[in-house]
Image (cartoon, rainbow, N blue to C red):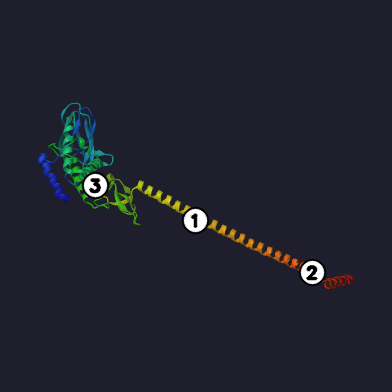
Amino acid sequence: MVGSQQWLAGVGVWLMASFPAFAGQYQLMLGQAQSVPIAVPVRNSDTQCHVQLQVSGQQVLERVLNAPLFETRVVIRPEQAGPLLVRWVGTAKRTETGVVNACPTEGQTELAVVNSNEGILAVWSALFTQLGPSMTACVRLALEAQQVRFDWYDLKAQQVSGEDTKINALLQQCEVFLSRSTAWGAKDPLRHACALPSGQKTVCEGYYAEAGRSGKVISHQQAIARQLQGLPWTTGVREQAPVKAQRLKREHDEEVRLQAQAAAQLEAQAKQQREEEARQAAQAKAEADKAEAEKVREAQQKEQEEKERLEKRSWMAKTYDDLKQKARGSHK
């Protein structure tokens, strides 16, 4: 981007080639009331002074003007086409707090009363084309912030207006504004690829903010307004709100999925443990039942063996055993 002086020189050359001088004045729409700023030249050290204003066909108006622009607004409703004069002369005025000095000035400006502003719009369109998209966007916002109604401001008028100072200033400030580096650099401020501090890729947008502790996010137009007012501003990059919302939803859904998966794994482990405990209990019971059955079998086998032994005794042994048993019975 070229420097401010070089750019303004280029615009100046273009303007000089198009018009005799870079000056201008508002035009008025026939039959339509419009508020027109009137600025008078005051070249002394006064910060406040008084003038009388005379609009053709209207009563004299008295206004107290203040530095630095010494500007006032006059509502004019022209009833016939052609030039309309606004004259002013400095006069002193007595007020309750004292006397307001007369503005050391006398002069007039001429406003053209027309039926259409098509010619003005064509001139501004050519200027915007020369300035380019970025500069045009800034200038349009700056004109709005400065309350300059460019669609009725005739840059080809052969006279000086108070709006000229504003327009020249905002052209310079827009050049300064556009020459500032931004957080998004050469990327599209509305949408560009970026990465979060974690390294995760996402989509970001640039934004303007008040400089300092507040860091309040402001609009593009508010940033330009702060530039015009000499107030600090800064820029930043943030994840686009819809993209962030989608990312957070995905992360939440993934967290829910992982929690459900972990819960399912715990339940599966608990089920497996219960089944193992049931298997072990069943095995222990089966072994105990087997052992008990073995005892019963052994007892039955011993009983059977004893029965068989007794049956296999000789007559003498049986008689002897019977006598011993009777003898035991008699001692009871």
**What residue did someone put label 1 on?**
265
CB under 8 Å between discs 2 and 1: no
Residue 154 sits in quarter: top left
- Is residue 68 toward the left or the right of residue 15 in the image? right
Amino acid bearing label 1: Gln
Mark 1 neighbour class, 10 Å CA radius: few under 14, some 14 to 19, many 20 or more: few
Of labels 2 and 1, earlier in sequence is: 1
Residue for point 15% across, 50% down = 5
Residue 146: percent from the left, percent from the top?
A: 24, 42
Residue sitting nearer the eye, 279 or 259 = 279
Residue for point 45% across, 51% down = 257
Q: Secondary structure at mark 1?
A: helix
Residue 222: percent from the left, percent from the top?
A: 28, 45
Find the distance from the CA under tag 2 to the CA under tag 1. 67 Å
Q: Secondary structure at mark 2?
A: helix
CB under 8 Å between discs 2 and 3: no
Amino acid bearing label 2: Leu
In the rendered view, would you say 311 is above or below 216? below
**What residue did someone put label 3 on?**
228
